[in-house]
Image: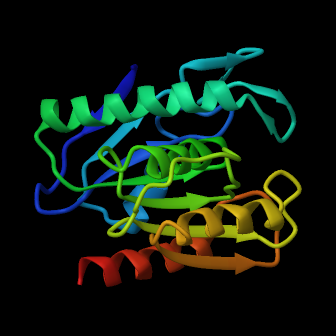
């Protein structure tokens, strides 16, 4: 999988940066630097092309995901993360995803806890209706969503929260009165969450 790795402090978590539709490896770098300036970053590029726009999995229409492809691509990303962990020699990894990138991070965390146990999700929604009954005790998830997000509406985000919590993941939610974007307040809340986890 095409990616960019930037070395950092080995005592800090590595941020796995997962861009939104049409984005690229540099999109969330500034977010990572706000969260933890000295952390290493691993930024792959979504392998699916939608009219030239990079994505992490196919969709049938706006908000309607190809669930078979979600499962396959989540498996591919999980394998990539495990390979990267061995190649670059890091341990703890925290996914930072926006929109489509947040959704694939959620899919990996829900189905492949061997690869991903922590994630910061901006503008996310449930990527899969049917999931394995895994015990996700030890998984920690932060979700920031706008209350008026037309692309990741709150009911779909609430479903994702439910899916994590019923599998015993530790979930923190941040809501704000806006739409589909990463906000300064969301980053601040994520940074505070990260500090609590590290403590």
Is residue 57 in view?
A: no
Rendered position, 155 above or below 177: above
Say which quadrant the C terminus sits in.
Answer: bottom left
Q: Position of residue 21 (x, y in %)?
A: 68, 34
Q: What's the residue at 33%, 29% (across, down)?
A: 79
**162 to the left or right of 120:** right
Q: Position of residue 26 (x, y in %)?
A: 48, 38
Is residue 157 in view?
A: yes
Q: Position of residue 92 (x, y in %)?
A: 22, 56
- Asked whether 13 or 29 is in front, the reply is 13
- Asked whether 56 or 26 is in front, the reply is 56
Q: Position of residue 158 (x, y in %)?
A: 73, 69
**190 to the left or right of 161:** left
The answer to which quarter of the image holds residue 42 is top left
Coloration of the structure image: rainbow
Q: What's the residue at 49%, 62% (across, down)?
A: 120
**Which residue is the extreme one toward the front?**
133
Say which quadrant the N terminus sits in.
Answer: top left
Q: What's the residue at 40%, 44% (across, down)?
A: 112
Rendered position, 38 above or below 195: above
- Asked whether 182 or 109 is in front, the reply is 109
The answer to which quarter of the image holds residue 149 is bottom right
Q: What's the residue at 56%, 32% (across, down)?
A: 71
Rendered position, 108 above or below 149: above
**67 to the left or right of 116:** right
């Amino acid at each position: 999988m095409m990616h960019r790795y930037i070395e950092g402090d080995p005592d800090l978590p590595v941020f796995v940066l997962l861009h939104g539709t049409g984005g690229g490896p540099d999109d969330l770098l500034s977010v990572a630097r706000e969260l933890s300036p000295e952390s290493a970053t691993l930024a792959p590029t979504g392998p699916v092309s939608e009219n030239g726009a990079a994505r992490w999995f196919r969709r049938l229409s706006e908000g309607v995901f190809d669930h078979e492809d979600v499962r396959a691509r989540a498996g591919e990303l999980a394998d990539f993360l495990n390979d990267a962990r061995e190649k670059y020699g890091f341990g703890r990894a925290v996914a930072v995803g926006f929109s489509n990138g947040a959704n694939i991070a959620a899919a990996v965390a829900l189905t492949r806890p061997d690869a991903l146990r922590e994630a910061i999700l901006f503008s996310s929604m449930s990527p899969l209706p049917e999931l394995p009954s895994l015990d996700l005790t030890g998984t920690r998830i932060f979700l920031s969503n706008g209350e008026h997000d037309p692309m990741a509406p709150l009911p779909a985000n609430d479903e994702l929260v439910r899916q994590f919590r019923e599998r015993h993941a530790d979930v923190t939610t941040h809501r704000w009165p806006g739409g589909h974007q990463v906000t300064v307040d969301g980053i601040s809340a994520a940074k505070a969450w990260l500090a609590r986890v590290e403590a």
